[in-house]
Image (tube, rainbow, N blue to C red):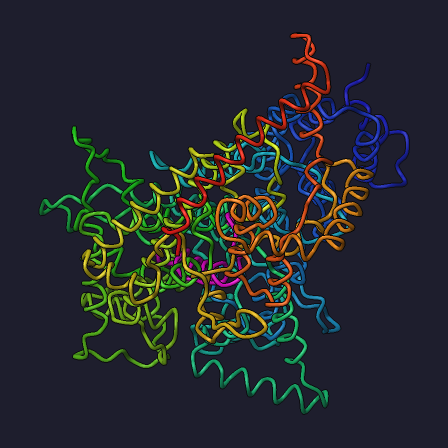
């Protein structure tokens, strides 16, 4: 059997009228159809090892697309997101080995990198804001796009990015997380754990390799560094603008941002770390609305863009910006992050915290002043504020405002909480005390909290608004409230947040105009190897800079510890109290329902409860243990909220009274506010508000005539209809006599009312929006024989007769004994019901 190398070489020698790479590509495409996955990967590794870069150059775009899938989602590639070790361990391990940072795929990338090959990536497949920006001739802040935009000679929207092999491979890898999900023609049939998928594992490996927490970035396995990208061809005639810089031409931008060839070798290696991070952030987080897109531009940039649009309109007699902005608006409406997307971002956030916290403190010796920090150390220092903060904040805002009000929001919540707690990923381990008290947040994290103030305060308010619209009786929703309250209740955290708010509200400093964005914004996306921004020494100015750079100069800040947010917290506390009451009533109802299924009640003759009441949550399906867990979550969440906002028990009790959340005399939650009329209960405006906000509700159960309910699965259809006709005939024939018997005083009247009336059903109907006409029909005494159509009743009778036959008791005698026994039971029940009646109200 010939090796792939020999076979491809023989094919080249046999026919020389076609370029050799064409045969290599054709053979690899044929292998995809004819060979198993393991053999294909082995052949690819051999080809990468033995062939020169000139021949590998032609197969590289096809190979990248074949692995990560096409940009339009038509080709799934290796489907790394659904490839899992438990279901397909062989292909899983082979794929990870091939795509490992030290594997054959990266060897191919470095081999092509050394020869400075370039590949086109369509701008149309970039995230919406970046795409619209480039089409608007506005160069994005991120240095990832600088010197890479290439325009077609004929003009138009056929724009491309000219990328080196490393960038091209990572672009495809990162965007495959979103591209394959957008295409609705491709069914996502995989139901696997995201954290165990090959894609998720590869993200973790790339982060650990290129953003190491210990040591330095490993150099490529090549003697030629090949790390500094060379200039890509482009036309300098098209004007470009940047978000945070004065207008300049492409040629000027190219010259200004071209890395020095004589740079330090360590700096040449860091560009891979910076490039990988920028690609991940741009592909996964750069998704914001049209309003945010306009807000992020400084005034002088808006003016330049306006001049450009007017000039283009005068030439083409149309508005070229209109379609771009409409496209961005449409993209934002369609962009709906998935739980998988959010989990990958959380992995990125957690690793970046560990990466940033691995920076060793600078020595305080006198010789330290002359020491220059390494590029990797400098990168660790600014990685979060410059590369991640702004885009993550906007991404979280989008999720908080558009994510469905269900338990899947837990993924977004945990990602947000992971960003808020960098101390969890610090190298020093917390000292666990015997009492397991929560560790106090150290003062050294105060700068991080102050420079991320909106992450703590505005998003907390956003979570409050979500929590007030969710069903807190659900255990999963109660857990989310508990998680947030527990994080913010960490000792010293609330005080540091409040200190940050005080620094922002100081009026002795004035933030300069927006044209100094290079000085104000902590998220300027240029390379950290370029000129550094001036050091900001004033803490208050830092906080103001953070807030205004994210929200604009006209932003009206809402204090987290102000009266407005405090009222929201009080409303949430009231909602938690009501949820606890509801959970307790559901638990009591479940216990009563379980107790009612005793052997005696199963054998009793009487109308069974045909109502299948709906509680509106998942507690009944989960069980008593989860109900107790829910109550624990809510109780601890309320305790944490009281610690954070310094609420006392008297305030909470008064709040419960003011909002009408106190239990009624029967221990049940009150009905919505309504008034009685001839047509039944009518909701007042307050009652409608209570229902809309989940404060109160009517019991959702059948309130009509029990005789007219649909035939149940445990009833005989024929018997139900026959017995209904018989009961109706008896009621029509003896209606007056039944009414007379039930109105009598004494034991006979009580005995008849017990059998012919249903006071419990009438009481339920009185507390529901049911018309008085229907209520009157339910209260009329009547005979009901529908219980005899129940299979349970028939089986009980058959069992009784069968047991009686063991004792030589005939059917007639058994029937007489059953009648006497039930008569005795009915007399007792009548007596006890009459004894309880004076105590009922």
Q: Is residue 245 left or right of residue 135?
A: left
Magenta-tinted stretch: 384-408
Q: 174 or 240: which is nearer to us?
A: 174
Quadrant including the N terminus: top right
Q: 143 or 302: which is nearer to us?
A: 302
Residue 137 in picture, x, y percent from top left:
59, 74
Quadrant including the C terminus: bottom left
Q: Is 11 a magenta residue? A: no
The residue shown at (52%, 35%) is 195
Residue 479 in view (yes/no): no
Q: 311 or 296: which is nearer to us?
A: 296
Q: Give the overall secondary structure of the magenta segment.
A: helix
Rendered view: 701 above or below 39: below
Rendered view: 333 above or below 764: below
Q: Residue 310 sits in which quadrant?
A: bottom right
The residue shown at (25%, 70%) is 562
Q: Is residue 815 left or right of residue 524?
A: right
Residue 19 in view (yes/no): yes
Instruction: Give the total of numbered labels.
Output: 0
Residue 810 in picture, x, y percent from top left:
72, 14
């Amino acid at each position: 059997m010939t090796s792939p190398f020999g076979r491809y070489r023989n094919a080249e020698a046999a026919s020389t009228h076609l370029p050799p790479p064409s045969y290599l590509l054709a053979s690899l495409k044929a292998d995809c159809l004819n060979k198993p996955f393991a053999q294909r990967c082995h052949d690819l590794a051999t080809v990468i090892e033995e062939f020169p870069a000139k021949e590998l150059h032609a197969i590289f775009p096809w190979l990248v697309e074949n692995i990560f899938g096409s940009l339009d989602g038509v080709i799934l590639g290796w489907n790394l997101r659904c490839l899992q070790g438990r279901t397909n361990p062989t292909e899983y391990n082979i794929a990870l080995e091939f795509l490992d940072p030290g594997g054959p795929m990266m060897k191919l990338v470095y081999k092509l990198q050394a020869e400075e090959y370039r590949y086109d990536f369509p701008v149309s497949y970039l995230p919406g804001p970046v795409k619209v920006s480039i089409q608007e001739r506005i160069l994005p802040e991120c240095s990832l796009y600088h010197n890479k935009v290439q325009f077609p000679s004929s003009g138009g929207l056929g724009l491309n990015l000219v990328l080196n092999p490393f960038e091209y491979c990572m672009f495809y890898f990162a965007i495959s997380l979103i591209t394959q999900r957008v295409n609705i023609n491709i069914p996502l049939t995989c139901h696997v754990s995201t954290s165990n998928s090959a894609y998720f594992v590869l993200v973790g490996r790339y982060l650990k390799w290129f953003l190491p927490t210990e040591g330095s970035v490993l150099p490529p396995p090549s003697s030629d560094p090949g790390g500094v990208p060379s200039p890509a061809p482009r036309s300098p005639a098209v004007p470009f603008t940047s978000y945070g810089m004065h207008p300049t031409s492409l040629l000027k931008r190219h010259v200004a941002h071209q890395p020095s060839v004589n740079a330090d070798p360590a700096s040449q290696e860091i560009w891979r770390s910076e490039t990988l991070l920028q690609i991940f952030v741009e592909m996964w987080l750069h998704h914001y609305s049209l309003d945010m897109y306009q807000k992020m531009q400084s005034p002088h940039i808006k003016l330049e863009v306006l001049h450009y649009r007017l000039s283009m309109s005068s030439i083409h007699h149309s508005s070229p910006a209109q379609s771009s902005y409409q496209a961005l608006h449409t993209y934002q409406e369609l962009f709906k992050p998935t739980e998988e997307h959010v989990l990958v971002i959380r992995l990125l956030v957690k690793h970046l915290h560990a990466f940033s916290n691995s920076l060793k403190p600078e020595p305080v010796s006198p010789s330290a002043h002359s020491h220059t920090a390494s590029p990797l150390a400098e990168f660790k220092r600014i990685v979060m504020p410059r590369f991640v903060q702004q885009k993550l904040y906007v991404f979280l805002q989008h999720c908080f405002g558009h994510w469905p009000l269900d338990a899947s929001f837990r993924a977004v919540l945990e990602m947000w909480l992971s960003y808020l707690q960098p101390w969890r990923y610090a190298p020093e381990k917390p000292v666990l005390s015997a009492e397991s008290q929560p560790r106090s947040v150290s003062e050294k994290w105060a700068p991080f909290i102050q420079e991320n103030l909106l992450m703590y305060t505005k998003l907390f308010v956003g979570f409050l608004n979500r929590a007030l619209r969710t069903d807190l009786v659900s255990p999963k929703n109660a857990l989310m409230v508990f998680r947030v309250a527990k994080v913010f209740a960490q000792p010293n955290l609330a005080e540091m947040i409040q200190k940050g708010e005080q620094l922002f509200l100081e009026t002795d400093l004035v933030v300069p105009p927006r044209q100094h964005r290079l000085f104000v914004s902590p998220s300027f996306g240029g390379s950290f190897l370029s000129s550094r921004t001036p050091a900001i020494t004033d803490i208050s100015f830092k906080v103001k800079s953070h807030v205004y750079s994210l929200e604009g100069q006209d932003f009206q800040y809402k204090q987290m510890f102000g009266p407005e947010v405090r009222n929201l917290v009080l409303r949430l506390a009231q909602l938690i109290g009501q949820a606890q009451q509801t959970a307790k009533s559901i638990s009591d109802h479940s216990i009563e329902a379980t107790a009612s299924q005793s052997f005696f009640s199963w054998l009793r003759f009487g109308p069974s409860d045909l109502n299948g009441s709906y509680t509106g949550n998942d507690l009944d399906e989960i069980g008593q243990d989860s109900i107790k867990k829910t109550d624990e979550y809510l109780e601890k969440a309320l305790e944490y909220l009281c610690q954070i906002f310094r609420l006392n028990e008297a305030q909470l009790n008064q709040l419960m009274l003011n909002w009408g959340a106190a239990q009624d005399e029967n221990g049940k939650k009150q009905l919505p506010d309504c008034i009685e009329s001839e047509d039944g209960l009518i909701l007042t405006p307050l009652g409608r508000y209570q229902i809309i906000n989940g404060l109160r509700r009517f019991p959702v159960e059948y309130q009509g005539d029990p005789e007219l309910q649909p035939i149940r699965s445990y009833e005989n259809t024929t018997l139900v209809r026959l017995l209904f006709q018989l009961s109706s005939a008896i009621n029509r024939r003896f209606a007056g006599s039944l009414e007379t018997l039930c109105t009598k005083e004494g034991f006979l009247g009580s005995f008849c009312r017990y059998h012919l009336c249903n006071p419990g059903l009438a009481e339920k109907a009185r507390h529901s929006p049911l018309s008085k006409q229907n209520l009157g029909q339910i209260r009329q005494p009547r005979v009901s024989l529908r219980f005899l159509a129940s299979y349970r009743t028939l089986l009980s009778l058959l069992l009784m007769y069968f047991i009686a036959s063991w004792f030589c008791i005939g059917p007639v005698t058994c029937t007489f004994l059953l009648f006497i026994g039930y008569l005795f039971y009915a007399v007792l029940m009548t007596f006890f019901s009459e004894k309880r009646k004076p105590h009922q109200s």
